[in-house]
Every structure is written in C-alpha cells, then in structure tokens.
Amino acid sequence: MSTTHALAAGTQPAGDASWRELGLCRQTDPDLFSPEEGDSTAEARRICFACKVRKPCLDWALERGEPGVWGGTSASQRKAIRRSRTPIRRAAA
Ligand code: SF4
C-alpha cells in the first residue's frame, strides 16, 4: 500500500516552503508520485525534471525522509544520497 504524496494530492506537507505552489505534480495524477513497491517511478521523475522547483523539493524531501517521488528521486535514491552525505565516523586513536 502506498502513502499518498502530499504535494501531488494537492495538500500541503508540513513545513514552510513557498515552492510547493509551483510543483508540476499538483497538475498530474498523484498516484504517479506514490508508487506501490516495485512500480516504476520513471514517469513521475520525468515530470520532476521539467519542474522549476525540483531543487528545493529535493532538499525538503532529503531533510524529512518522505516516501514517494520528490525532486526527481525515488525514496531509495534519496536514501542513497543521505548515506553519501553522512560523514564517516573514524574510531578514536
Ligand atoms: S520536483 Fe517533482 S515532486 Fe517536487 S514539486 Fe516538482 S513535480 Fe512535484
């Protein structure tokens, strides 16, 4: 079962961000942005790459760990981005 993508569904996710009003996903099928596990995210991500607010959207989703497609990325892609940004802890000498 997928979680509804708040922005694509026309509702406002938590947090302050004026960019949300300009999201192309608000003009499309919300289900594209909340795929079932194993479904393709290609169509939603294609729409994101034409969206003028992709960067703030991606930053917003990276901060919050949202499910679904945000900022041209799937949830697993954002997880990989967050992991790559996490500093490596080194053992104390
Ligand atoms: S980048 Fe994608 S998810 Fe974000 S606002 Fe634009 S269309 Fe919606």
Image: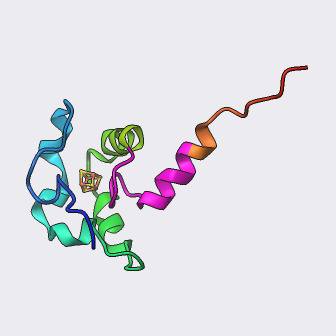
Q: Quadrant of residue 49?
A: bottom left
- Direction from residue 89 to residue 26 in the image, left or right: left
Q: Residue 56, located in which quarter of the rendered image? A: top left
Looking at the image, residue 66 lies above or below residue 76 = above
Is 1 left or right of 85, judged from the image as shown?
A: left
The residue depicted at 32 percent of the width and 48 percent of the height is: 54
Which sits in the foreground, 63 or 23? 63
The quarter of the rendered structure image containing the C terminus is top right
Q: Residue at x 83, y 27 (%)?
A: 91
Between 57 and 13, the one nearer to me in the picture:
13
12 in magenta: no
Residue 50 versus residue 78: which sits nearer the camera? 78
Identified at 35% across, 45% down, the residue is 61
Q: Position of residue 25 (x, y in %)?
A: 19, 59
Q: Residue at x 17, y 52 (%)?
A: 7
> How many numbered markers are drawn?
0
Q: Quadrant of residue 38?
A: bottom left
Q: Residue furthest bottom?
A: 39
Q: Is residue 86 left or right of residue 2?
A: right
Spot occupied by residue 12 in the image (x, y as percentages of width and height): 12, 44
Query: Eyeballing the image, is 88 above or below 41?
Result: above
The quadrant of the picture occupied by the N terminus is: bottom left
Where is residue 45 shown, x and y percent of the image? Answer: 35, 65
- In the image, the segment drawn in magenta is 65-82
Is residue 67 on the magenta stretch? yes
Residue sticking out furthest to the top: 93
